[in-house]
Image (tube, helix red, strand yellow):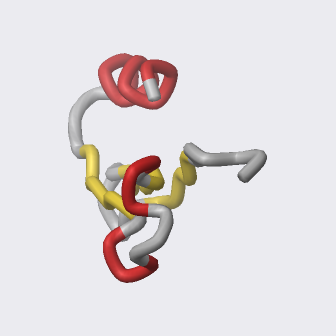
Amino acid sequence: LANRKTVSIHPGGTDLSVALTTTKTRKQNKPASVQHKSVMKKEFQKMAKAVINQ
């Protein structure tokens, strides 16, 4: 595959949270468990650093 690891960012909800979704590179043949979702509710600098490190 060309893009084995992808990162997606969505608004988390009504508060100032961000939902970060990444794909797992070793689970490409199992579609049910290929995505890892996490909701980040910390300050902006920490969330931006976490997204950059992905």
Residue drawn at x 40%, y 64% is 35
Decide: is 52 above or below 21: above
Where does residue 42 sit, x and y in percent of width and height? 22, 34
**Residue 20, horizontal then vertical, whole percent:** 41, 50
43 and 48: which is toward the camera: 48
Q: In the image as oriented, which residue stretches furthest toward the front? A: 29
The percent position of residue 6, horizontal first and vertical second, equals 59, 47
Residue at image position (33%, 58%) is 36
Of residues 14 and 3, the one nearer the viewer is 3
Q: In this view, which residue lies farthest toward the left?
A: 42
Name, please, the residue furthest toward the right.
Answer: 2
Number of numbered discs overlaid on the protein picture: 0
**Residue drawn at (55%, 46%) of the image:** 7
Q: Please indicate whether residue 13 sits to the left or right of residue 31 in the image.
A: left
Estimate the x, y position of residue 5 in percent, counting from the top left. 56, 44
Lateral position of residue 31 relative to residue 39, left or right: right
Q: Work out whether residue 21 or residue 2 is closer to the camera in this orientation and state it.
A: 2
Q: Nearer the viewer, residue 44 or 3?
A: 3
Q: Is residue 39 left or right of residue 12?
A: left
Identity of the residue drawn at 46% across and 54% down: 23
Q: Is residue 3 left or right of residue 24?
A: right
